[in-house]
């Protein structure tokens, strides 16, 4: 969600503050306490895999890293497709090309509350959600390779892919709280670093495929690759605590939505999120105004994504030790200085 994708205001184990954009949608709004309260009295804690470590926890996190990277990495690489569609038939000259990428990423962000709600309501389908979502994404990419106009691409590469991606990705967020508690921040940081990694690699791969084989072959190759790379890992994306009748969902109290605390938190979250995508959008254009080549302009985004890989992991680890508000303050000050001072006064490419 880079990932690289979202504000990394991860809550510490005591749950005193808001969680990140993706995670917060799946959390119980009251607090994030020790996950041991999730274990029914009918279950013996000693029979369950360990929390915050152990083979099962790390395999789960590795699988989530790959799912995060591939599900979110593709829409984050849409800029390469947009440039190709804008300059090649049968889409050249269409005014709706940008809508494809907007749907792919925007729908995944906006429909997550609905998907989380459905999976919370019917937990027995949570594991099937990842499998069904993966199949839907692969079918969407395969169908988009047959597109002859932008409407077809909007429906397949945009809407269908986003819906499938939401169902494939959501269980990662829902299960991670069961596997990690004291190292929850680090776990989220590692998972979200996946988007930054693919954001640095996937655009180069897609650009080569598009220029060599065209969009139809590229989409089919990525559809098959997505299935082969992700399919074997679905086994590891599973809850730590088995679903039993005693774990049936309880009624949720949404009175917190009307509180001033939630309103202020959400307003600040939205304001900060509005600026999240701006650097990656304008860095290449700004670099070209300084006389940089197209390759160097693209390099600025690649370096941004590479830095986000280390930034996600580092911030996640720090949040486990410091209060979340202190981490957000440091991150905000650093981002502000980077954008308004270093970037704002730059007259050459190196800064």
Image: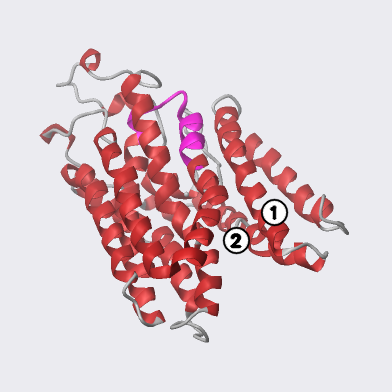
Residues 328 and 261: in front is 328
Q: Is residue 13 magenta?
A: no
Q: Is residue 214 left or right of residue 309?
A: left
Q: Position of residue 159 (x, y in %)?
A: 35, 69
Tag 2's secondary structure? helix
Tell me which corner region of the image, top left, top right, bottom left or bottom right, holds residue 330.
Answer: top right
Q: Position of residue 149 (x, y in %)?
A: 38, 82
Q: Is residue 187 magenta?
A: yes
* Residue annotated with mark 2: 274
Q: Position of residue 111 (x, y in %)?
A: 36, 61
Q: Which residues are magenta?
A: 176-192
Q: Which mark is residue 171?
A: none
Tag 1's secondary structure? helix
On screen, residue 269 above or below 325: below
Q: Nearer the N terminus, badge 2 or badge 1?
A: 2
Residue drawn 31% across the image and 54% down it: 224
Task: Give the CA separation, mark 2 to mark 1.
Answer: 20 Å
Residue placed furthest toward the top: 46
Q: How is the image coloured?
A: secondary structure
Residue drawn 32% across the image and 36% down it: 175
Q: Which mark is residue 300?
A: 1
Q: Main secondary structure of the magenta part?
A: helix
Q: Position of residue 49 (x, y in %)?
A: 28, 19
Disc 2 residue crowd, few under 14, some 14–19, many 20+, Cα 10 Å: few
Residue drawn 13% across the image and 33% down it: 244
Disc 1 residue crowd, few under 14, some 14–19, many 20+, Cα 10 Å: many
Q: Depth-wise, is mark 2 or mark 1 nearer the camera?
A: 1
Tell me which corner region of the image, top left, top right, bottom left or bottom right, holds residue 63.
Answer: top left
């Amino acid at each position: 969600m880079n990932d690289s994708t979202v504000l990394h205001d991860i809550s510490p184990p005591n749950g005193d503050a808001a969680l990140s954009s993706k995670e917060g949608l799946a959390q119980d709004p009251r607090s994030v306490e020790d996950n041991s309260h999730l274990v029914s009295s009918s279950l013996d804690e000693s029979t369950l895999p360990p929390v915050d470590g152990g083979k099962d926890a790390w395999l789960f996190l590795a699988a989530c890293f790959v799912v995060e990277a591939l599900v979110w990495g593709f829409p984050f690489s849409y800029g390469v497709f947009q440039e190709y569609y804008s300059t090649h038939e049968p889409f050249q000259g269409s005014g709706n090309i940008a809508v494809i990428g907007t749907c792919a990423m925007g729908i995944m962000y906006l429909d997550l509350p609905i998907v989380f709600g459905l999976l919370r309501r019917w937990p027995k389908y949570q594991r099937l959600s990842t499998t069904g979502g993966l199949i839907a994404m692969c079918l969407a990419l395969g169908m988009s390779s047959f597109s002859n106009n932008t409407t077809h691409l909007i429906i397949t590469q945009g809407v269908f892919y986003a819906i499938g991606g939401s169902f494939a990705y959501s269980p990662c967020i829902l299960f991670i709280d069961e596997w990690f508690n004291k190292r929850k921040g680090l776990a989220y940081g590692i998972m979200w670093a996946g988007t930054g990694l693919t954001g640095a690699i996937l655009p180069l791969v897609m650009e080569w495929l598009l220029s060599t084989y065209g969009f139809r072959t590229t989409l089919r190759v990525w559809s098959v690759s997505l299935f082969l790379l992700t399919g074997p890992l679905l086994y590891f994306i599973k809850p730590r605590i088995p679903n039993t009748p005693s774990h049936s969902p309880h009624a949720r109290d949404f009175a917190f939505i009307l509180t001033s605390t939630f309103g202020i938190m959400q307003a600040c979250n939205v304001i900060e999120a509005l600026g999240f995508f701006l650097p990656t959008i304008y860095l290449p254009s700004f670099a070209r105004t300084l006389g940089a080549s197209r390759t160097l302009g693209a390099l600025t985004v690649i370096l941004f994504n590479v830095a986000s890989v280390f930034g996600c992991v580092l911030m996640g680890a720090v949040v486990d030790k410091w209060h979340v508000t202190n981490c957000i303050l440091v991150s905000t000050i650093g981002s502000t200085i980077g954008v308004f001072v270093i970037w704002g006064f730059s007259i050459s490419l190196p800064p």
